[in-house]
Image (cartoon, rainbow, N blue to C red):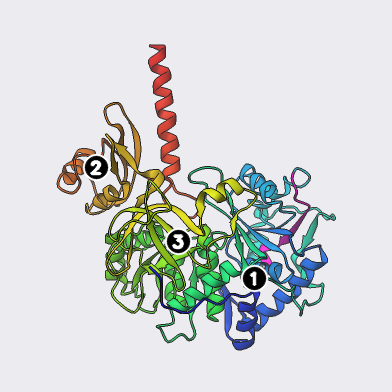
Amino acid sequence: MTTTLPEVPVRPLYEFLDQAAASHSQKPAMDFLGRQWTYAELGDMVNRAAAGFRMIGVGKGVKVGLCLPNTPYHVVCYFAILKAGGTVVNYNPLYVERELSHQVKDSGTTIMVTLDLAQIYPKVAALLGQSPLEKIVICPMSGILPTVKSWLFKVLKRSEIATIPDDSNHVTFDHLLAAGRLDHPEPINPKQDIAVLQYTGGTTGVPKGAVLTHANISANVEQLCQWVSCFELQDERMLCALPFFHVFGMTVAMLVGVALGAELILLPRFEIEQVVKVMARKRPTMFPGVPTIYIAINRHIATNGITLDLRSIRACISGGAPLPLEVRQEFERITGASLVEGYGLSECSPVATCNPFDRPVRDGSIGLPMPGTRVEIRSLVDVRKAVPQGEKGEVCVKGPQVMAGYWQKPDETDHVMVDGWLRTGDVGYIDEDGFVFIVDRLKEVIICGGYNVYPRVIEEALYRHEAVAEAAVIAIPDQYRGQAPKAFVKLKEGKTASADELKAFLVDQVSRLEMPKIIEIRRELPRTMVGKLSKKVLMDEEKARSAEAAVMTQKN
């Protein structure tokens, strides 16, 4: 559908920070474990760090990696790199050396910013001389902690601090700040200059770098700010539990937070006990998250019998994975907060659709297109042909937030970009009111005897069982039907259910074709680095199991 809202303005991303520093100079900009910085202090650090990045060679076309958890360093260096004219490349600090190496080589990252922690630094240092990486900017963990915590960290956590060589390959964060101020940032052409190379999760293959221009990301920030404009926005507090190295956390938490002049409540990792304490102390007003986070909060409250009043939260957005209806309803019931589901992907900077805040949520829907965004359902046979309203097909998106392409992968870009429309790889439909519904991933659709079976339908049915905490469904080989569904289930703490009992429950919930051939109950289900259930790991396990069974059959 085509929205009636005006064209979305675009700009260099660093302007959001400059405006916040000018308009909200004395308001808190960041809270990290109790230590605060104002927007004036944040703006000053960014301008000084930008001068430091210029000093070490950052300019147009230079790729600078951020291998950091959510800390003030990430916020400062992100905007400083952009002010110096460089391109940010986001890295997951939990990646192993092999994964870091692939991304460094593919992107051409020459400078990496990381912490002085033994858990992270050695993996980055190993790439010096073995890849395009030439310099490492070292950020001391003790430098951002409150005074007492900083002293205790240096004394009690000495073994967790890495030994850093004193050579030309290493630059300290303090050295960056000592380079002066960059009061005149690099001129930016928003529609051409690359702000971020955001690598996809690699759930369906090797991770690819989505090329996101300043225009792409700034448009998405503007769209989201318009989306929450139905509230009287003042003194907002954004709970940043999502990692900034992930595109959802980067845009919806960090950038929208800065654009609104909100206080960023930074959490270096998601730990439910810490999250609950921070919520009670800081009373956040905005809280983007993935379904796993809301499931964890639901479970924590139910298990511990506590009361958690989250009515201070006005904008609570779930993304990154399908949000089960039962999870949303339980979260709203026990917290008093409103939770809406949105939808996006790295290639959309990332948000394409979201349920509105100013009218009732459409159950099971991913909402309406963002301002200035069009969503069409295209034929699964001919992607250039739109299907009638209500029919299922591939969800395609067109809008200012859609990427410029994949980094140095023209063939893969041509495959997903058709006449300016992004093929999402998701199967869905649009109802009579323009709300978009996702049925499943195109590559995850199970073909049973020639019929399409959608894993999400089975997962939603399993979530309706009172004992089921999490569920994931994948395809397994079937001699008769070609493929069959297999379900993996994690039960709620204190609840019991057998595979046969779950199958009996599903009898009147799904069709015979959709009935899982196998239900495997596990203590834990594998996750991606950002907390989503990882079907790729489950598929790989099944392939390995099938290969092992084939070898045993041959031996016998």
Who comes first in sequence, dot 1 or dot 3? 1
Who comes first in sequence, dot 2 or dot 3? 3
Disc marking residue 190: 1
SS for dot 2: loop
In the picture provided, is 507 more to the left or to the right than 468? left
Q: Where residue 214 appears, x then y in whole percent?
A: 62, 68
Image quadrant assignment for residue 196: bottom right
Type of amino acid at the residue the image marks with label 2? Glu
Q: Nearer the viewer, residue 157 or 340?
A: 340
Q: Where residue 449 appears, x then y in whole percent?
A: 27, 34
Disc marking residue 397: 3
Whether residue 494 is visible, yes or no, is no
Q: Is residue 450 above or below residue 134?
A: above
Q: CA distance from mark 2 to mark 3?
A: 29 Å
Where, quadrant-wise, is the C terminus in this rendering? top left
Q: Where residue 452 appears, x then y in whole percent?
A: 29, 43
Whether residue 551 is visible, yes or no, is yes
Dot 1, crowdedness within 10 Å: few (<14), some or many (≥20)?
some
Dot 3, crowdedness within 10 Å: few (<14), some or many (≥20)?
many
Q: Where residue 133 appears, x then y in whole percent?
A: 75, 50
Disc marking residue 514: 2
Q: CA distance from mark 1 to mark 3?
A: 21 Å
Type of amino acid at the residue the image marks with label 3? Val
Residue stretch in magenta: 131-147
Q: CA distance from mark 2 to mark 1?
A: 47 Å
Q: Is residue 467 above or below residue 234?
A: above
Q: Residue at x 62, y 75 (%)?
A: 11
In the picture provided, is 392 more to the left or to the right than 58? left
Q: Residue at x 41, y 61 (%)?
A: 293
